[in-house]
Each structure stands twice: as C-alpha cells, then as structure tokens.
Amino acid sequence: MPEPVRRGIGLRWMASAALLVSMAALLPLGFILWAAMAAGWPTALALVMRPRVAELLANTAALVACTVPLCGLLAVALAWLTERSALPFARAWSALIVAPLAVPAFVQGYAWITLFPAMHGLAATVLVSVIAYVPFLYLPVAATLRRLDPALEDVAASLGQAPWRVFRRIVLPQLRMALCGGGLLIGLHLLAEYGLFVLIRFDTFTTAIIDQYRSTYNGPAASMLAGVLAACCVGLLGVDAAMRGRRRFARLGSGAARTAPRVALGRLHIPALLLCGVLVAISLGVPVATLGRWLARAGAGVWRFDDITSAFGQTFYLAVAGGLAAIIAAAPMAWLSVRAPGPLQRTVEGCNYVSGALPGVVIALALVSITVGLPIYQSAITVVFAYVLLFLPRAMLSLRASIAQVPVELEHAAGSLGRSPARVLWAITARLAAPGASSGAALVALGIMTELPATQMLAPNGTYTLATAFWAYSSEIDYASAAPYALIMILMSIPLTWLLYIHSHYLAGR
C-alpha cells in the first residue's frame, strides 16, 4: 500500500480516537450548560452579572497575570544559570530547584500559614504560587536550553552581536515552545487550585464554586461560576495558540556534538548564588522546617500506622491507574497536534484543556449526574475517569513536546518500507517519545496524590487517601495530626520528581 494511503488511514484512526477523548473532556462543560438551561437563561445571566463575579474575575486575572510571568522570568534565569553559566555546583542546584515539585501546593500553603497565620491576600498568594509552580516551567526551559545547538549562537556572535542580543534573538525564540507549554500548565493549575487558596484566604472562582456547593448546594449559581471559569480557560488557550505559532522544532541528525561553553559570572557570582539559595530555602526549607516542628511537638502518638498504611496504598493505586489512563487518552490528540496542525485540530485540542481548568468538584458533580444509577457509580472506574479529565492537560503538554522532537521523516521512512500506521506509531513515535510519556504520567500522578474534591465525592465508600486525610485534619486546625500525611505525600512525590528531572536530562542526551 502506498505510503500516503497508509498515512491517511493512520490519520483517520488517530483523529477518531482524539475526537472521542475530546468529546468526553467536554462532559463537564455540557453539565454546566445543562444546569444553565435548567435554571433558565434569564436566571443564568443574572447570576453571571453579579458584582461578586466581577470581583472573582479580577482576583483570578490578577493572580494569573502576576504568577505566570514571574515564574517565566525565574525559570529562564535559573535555567541559564544552571545550564550555561559557571555557577558552582550547577547540577546540585538544578536538582534542588526541581525538588519543590515533591511538595504539594496546599502543603506549601500549610507550611507558610502555620508560620505566619496573618498571611493572606494577593501578594501572599502569588509568593506561594510562584514557589510551588516555578519548577513546572524550569524543567522544560532547562531541558530545551541544554540541547540547543551552540553553533547558531556562535554564528550570531561572529557577526558582531552582543551576548544579550544573541540570547534575545537566537536563544529566547527557541525557548518559546517550553515557555508556552509550561506557562499554560501553570495557568491551568491556578484556575483549578483549591486547597492553597483556602489556606491563604484568597478568593478565586474555584474557592467560590466549592463554597457555594458546600454551604447552600446552590447548583445554578456554582455552575454559572464554573462557566466563567471555563471561559477563562479558553482565553488562556487562545494566548497559548497565538504565542506557539506553527514553527518546526525538530531536526534530522543530532546537531552539535558539543555543549555550549559555560559563561563566567564575574560580579554576578554572589547574586546568582543568593538567588538560587533563597529560592531553595523558601521552597524547601520552610515546609521541611514546619513539618519537623509539628512532628517533634506531637511525638510518636501522631503516627497512626494502620490509617497511614491504608491511605498510602489507596493513594498509590489511584496514582498509577490515573497516570497510565491519562497518557493513553492524551496520545492521539498530542500526535495530531504536532503532525497535523490546523484550525480544526486546535479547536478539538482546546476541548481537552477545558476540563483541566475546572475544579474537581464540578467534574465530580457532572460525573455523579451521569453515572448515578449505573454500575460504575462511586467506583474506581469513575474516579480514574475524573482524574483523566482533570489532568489530561499535563499528559497532553508532556507528550506534545516529546512528539515535536521526533522527526516526521522517520515516520515517513518507516511507512515507505511497508509498515502499517500502528507499527510505525509503536516502533518509531512511541519509543522515541517514551521519556515524555513517563514524565507526563509522573506529572499526572503528582496531581492525583493531591486531588481533594473529586476523590471525596466520587471514590467508593471507605476510600482514604493521603490528601483527604491531610485535609480532614488541617481543616480542624489539627496541624500536628496532618503532618505525617504531608510528609508521606512528599516522600511519595520524590521518586516522581526525580523521574521528571532525569527525563529533562535524557531529552538533552546527557
């Protein structure tokens, strides 16, 4: 069979699978529209136009507008220091910068709020959010910076370009894919985060939606808030699509066999060390010191080993199942995003991000409405499905970046030798993109371990995860009893964080 025909068959299968997943990802949005129709459009419009909605929109917009650029600036500066400068112990600093990924965002909030109980408001929320989420941008930026061909910079320098102009005109444009992907991921996190903002006492759409449901169970009001939150997600997707463009990021061959020379820091030596040291101290030192203080104060009686063992086992099972399911679901759309870009593809791709921007409680209520009366109601299947909807963007962005690094010419060559589209996908694309798949699964697992509302509402009776146990104790201001669960969540997250760190170095061929 000619290669174009085979490619057409493979494209149709991938498009069909991607469309099916995208339709499933729209279920929560369909639930919001159904709730609006049930309430009546005049009532829905009145609920959206309330002053409270404008206040929440301003809070959310300010949070995203402050946090994402700060994370971007920090990520680029730290990546350049650890990958391109003569910073002492650069590899150790790199690992320490990534390490806060092992600390859930609401554990960061728990650590800061127990040290500074009066801490609240936009500035405090931005501070803790940047600390919690900057590794999501540092990892892809550092990996991309590490593998860039230094010959391009040498040519620009030989033409008389100053170092700053070389960085701005040659290096920075090649970091665009990493910055857009990481920035979008952080933005979606900020739209859906709940625990951190409750602890810091900063109102966003997510906290307002859950408060609305839990206090008065006012479905229409909360659903309309969720609709505005979904519109914010669409806005983020539009910005990402405009900035990403349609440039090619893969090349045939290995490029330069040498690494870029390290730049001496000179008078910036001390400020660079201070930047890295202060960030590590506040992102790792504060939570570790806080947990140590509470554990030492509580003594051995706080370790309820039967409960802790049960929570650990159930958390591990759900994290593994959800991570694998999310990668499988994201693969078709990630492949189409890179191999067949276009307006229709980007529209369908955007559907996969909408559910990721919604709080877990909205997705949980949508699935409760759909599955009630079915055998899968309050089963592990429904919980894993909710995790896939929640964390599909994490898997999608990781896979998309890895597939973009696989030259399409290799797929064409394998197809021209008579291999079927499925064999080409498995033998070429899947194997070369496997590091991205593993990092995506790790990112999903990290999210599952800290998910609260969806787990509480959808899990079968008796489900007891580390996150739900931690939240139950911290909600009662029993910080000592919550500390062991926070510590175990961190210990469970360390191998996944290490996997992400190793993957970033694997991508650069180190």
Image (cartoon, rainbow, N blue to C red):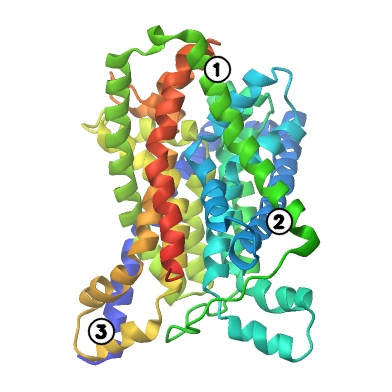
Which of the pair 54/31 is nearer the observer?
54
Residue at image coords 75%, 91%: 159
Q: Residues within 10 Å of mark 1 (few under 14, many from 20)?
A: few
Instruction: Please tell me whether mark 3 or mark 1 is closer to you in this view.
Output: 1
Considering only vertical position in the picture, is 356 above or below 475? below
Residue at image coords 22%, 73%: 422
Q: Which numbered dot is residue 73? A: 2
Considering only vertical position in the picture, is 389 above or below 147? above
Which of the pair 340/487 is nearer the observer?
487
Which structural element holds mark 3?
Answer: helix
Three-letter residue code for mark 3: Arg
Q: Position of residue 62 (x, y in %)?
A: 75, 42
Which of the pair 81/245 is nearer the observer?
81
Q: Earlier in the sequence, mark 3 or mark 1?
A: 3
Q: Position of residue 441 (x, y in %)?
A: 36, 51
**Residue placed under numbered mark 3 in the picture:** 6
Q: Which numbered dot is residue 293? A: 1
Relative side of 374 to 509, left or right: left
Residue at image coords 71%, 74%: 167
Q: Which numbered dot is residue 88? A: none
Three-letter residue code for mark 2: Leu
